[in-house]
Amino acid sequence: MNFLNFLIYWAGFVLLMIFLANFIAPKKLNYAENINRMENFHRQVFCVHCGYTALTLLAMALVCGFYNDELVTAEKGSLAWAGCLFMAIFWGTRVVVQIVYYDKAMKKRYPVFNIMFFIAFAYLAVIFTFLTIN
Amino acid sequence: MNDYLIILLKLAGLGQLVLVLASIAIPRCLDWKGGLAGLIPLLRQMFWTYAVYITLMHVFFGVVSLFATEELLDGGFISTALCGLMFIWWFARILIQFFFFDRTSVPETKFNRLAEAGLVLLFVFLSAVYGWGVWENLA
């Protein structure tokens, strides 16, 4: 296993942690009370969005864990390369969303979480961008 | 390689890109702005962020199906996994439509009924095509 394989395994671990954070966030951010203010249908759409986001994170984590070599050796234009490009865009834009879009008051209230998420998103963006251009 | 499946995968890709374009109208049709008004800002922002990233997934599925069709059926690990993910994604969406969503709160207009029928047909088509793709990759 070379260093790049190790970095991708680590990316898989980071993705798994973000996936697990999706199960902690509802309690921390008091989802239940908040989403109860919404109409039933909008509440359900929110839950479906959360579910699909979790599925996306899990799929990415599994790819990094089980298809590690395919990502390292991906040739430009291949399916694995397209996956790396997609994940580079996904996490690159997620860094920007974290900095400029998410509620500043909440980031001040939870500075450690904010920094942890920022580092995690930035790490994923760098890794997948490197795999895309390498 | 199955020529019919290649054509169906390309159609599936096109269908998902059309769905992405149609998704632009969903927030207005379902009054997301009004529906989210009572939420704290962070949850509202998360709702929109999740919606955009799910749409981005649909763009990825659409582009890959349309332009990397043969690679999707090469029998490799990545192609099988990706077909599997897209099958799970769309099959789950059918189950959500019928067993999770409370459709009674959506206005009973002719447009909404037609839109729902179109969406369900698309989800069934996508599930069938990607399910076949998984089967073909494993065969």
Image (tube, coloured by chain):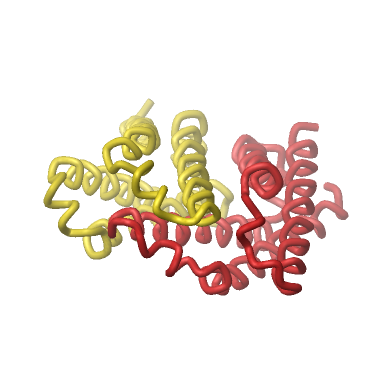
Residue B117 appears in view: yes
Q: Is residue B5 above or below residue B14?
A: above
Q: Position of residue A2 (x, y in %)?
A: 35, 30
Q: Which sits in the foreground, A57 or B41?
A: B41
A57 sits to left or right of B113: left
Q: Can you give x and y, in whole percent of width and height, for residue A71 in the image?
A: 47, 41
B92 on left or right of A11:
right
Question: Which residue sits at x=66%, y=62%?
Answer: B16
Residue A128 locus on image (x, y percent): 38, 49
- Classify residue A111 as left or right of residue B55: left
* Chain in yellow colour: A
Q: Quadrant of residue A90?
A: bottom left
Q: Which residue appears at 37% of the width and 64% of the height?
A: B37
Q: In x, y percent, where is residue B10?
A: 74, 61
- The answer to whether any part of residue B83 appears in the image is no
Q: State which quadrant residue B122 falls in.
A: bottom right
The quadrant where residue A57 appears: top left
Report which colour depicts chain B.
red
Identify which residue, A124 or B93, lies in the foreground.
B93
In the rendered view, tell whether residue B48 sits above or below residue B101.
below
- Quadrant housing the N terminus of chain A: top left
Please report the residue visible at 46 percent of the width from the left and 40 percent of the height from the top.
Answer: A54
Residue sitting at x 66%, y 56% = B104
The vertical placement of A70 against A35, above or below, is above
**Number of marks in picture:** 0
